[in-house]
Amino acid sequence: MTSADGVHAHERPSLNGTNSTTSIHGTNALDVLLIRVEHELYAIPSSSVREVARYRTITPVPGAPRSLPGIISQRGTILAVVDLRLTLDLGLADVTRASRLVIVSHQEIDMALLVDAVLDLASIPGDQIELVPAALDPARARFLSGIVQIDGEPMALLDLGELINSLREWS
Amino acid sequence: MIVLISTATRRYAIRRDDLTSMQVVATDQDLASLSTAERPAIPIDLGALLDPADRSAPGRKHGLVVPLRRRPIVFLVERVEQSIEQATIRPLPTLISGCLRDIWAIGVLDFDDQLIILLDLRAVARSSMAQRPVATR
């Protein structure tokens, strides 16, 4: 995975460049990219992340839903941009210097996720992934596959498959 | 042939074959010249139709005339930029093409390091006509 200049993400010593590692406890671990959307923290499986790019102008497509603000060209490939703020119903906001486009590939679909910031990489022991709380708003919970605690902060694991399914429901 | 056009804030590509003519529309007489007694032309600000924030100021425009069976539609744009004889049009990502409210965007052109959306202007014209009150069609 490459990252944009100035991104403060860095690999932790426990990461060895593979998609999945084994923790000292012997359980399978999940490598993730940590992002911020609004004031909430989310984790994306690193196995799906191709690249992190600085924000740049997005070309709008007439008639597309608000959660798909347009397209970009990334190394010659045209990608749909998914605004995670709007998808997660967190409201519209201006992009900032910290805004990033996280290029992901899942189920043979490539797309760019617009996020407010990319924070770090982390490795999560499999036995530390908790279920999504039942009390969470179902509209939000459908996009999550679990909750993890990293440095005392709760983070939600994004379910990219469900994200793609929700976008396909428009058609 | 592909024609590049600009609205107040955007650039789009269209197919020349979708039009009967392109001409300057600076006065009401220019617009009237595109009409007949039985089939008065309907002027539409193309930029504002595609994005309400893309609204141009009054003044001299270029008119793109799309013939419909009932009446001609005249899409008003800031200017016609250039024609491209051989253009490579790429499909939109399926994630976005499957979500479009109307199938107005049918491809994308990578030109001058900029992505430009290719419009099906006949489809835009048909939708615009269908959305008008019956008495004004």
Image (cartoon, coloured by chain):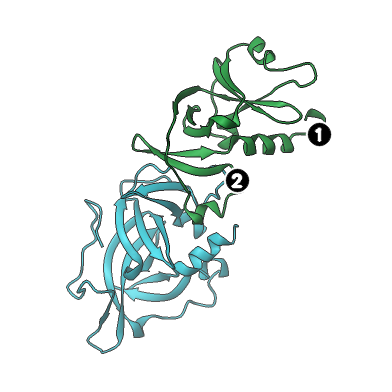
Q: Which residue is mark 2?
A: B103
- Is residue A96 rendered to the left or right of residue B62? left
- As shown in the figure, which amino acid type bears the numbered disc 2? Ile
- Residue A151, picture quadrant: bottom left
Q: Residue A150 has which mark?
A: none
- Alpha carbon separation for disc pair 1 and 2: 22 Å
Provide the secondary structure element on which disc 2 rests.
loop
Provide the secondary structure element on which disc 1 rests.
helix
Q: Residues within 10 Å of mark 1 (few under 14, many from 20)?
A: few
**Letter of the green chain:** B
Chain on which label 1 sits = B
Q: Residue B134 has which mark?
A: 1
Judging depth in this view, the residue of B32 and A28 nearest the camera is B32
Percent from the top left, x then y, of residue B118?
50, 39
Residue visible at 67% across and 17% down in the picture: B34
Residue visible at 35% across and 75% down in the picture: A149
- Is residue A79 rendered to the left or right of residue B102? left
Chain on which label 2 sits = B
**Letter of the cyan chain:** A
Q: Would residue A60 be visible to someone looking at this image?
A: no
Judging depth in this view, the residue of A167 and A38 nearest the camera is A167
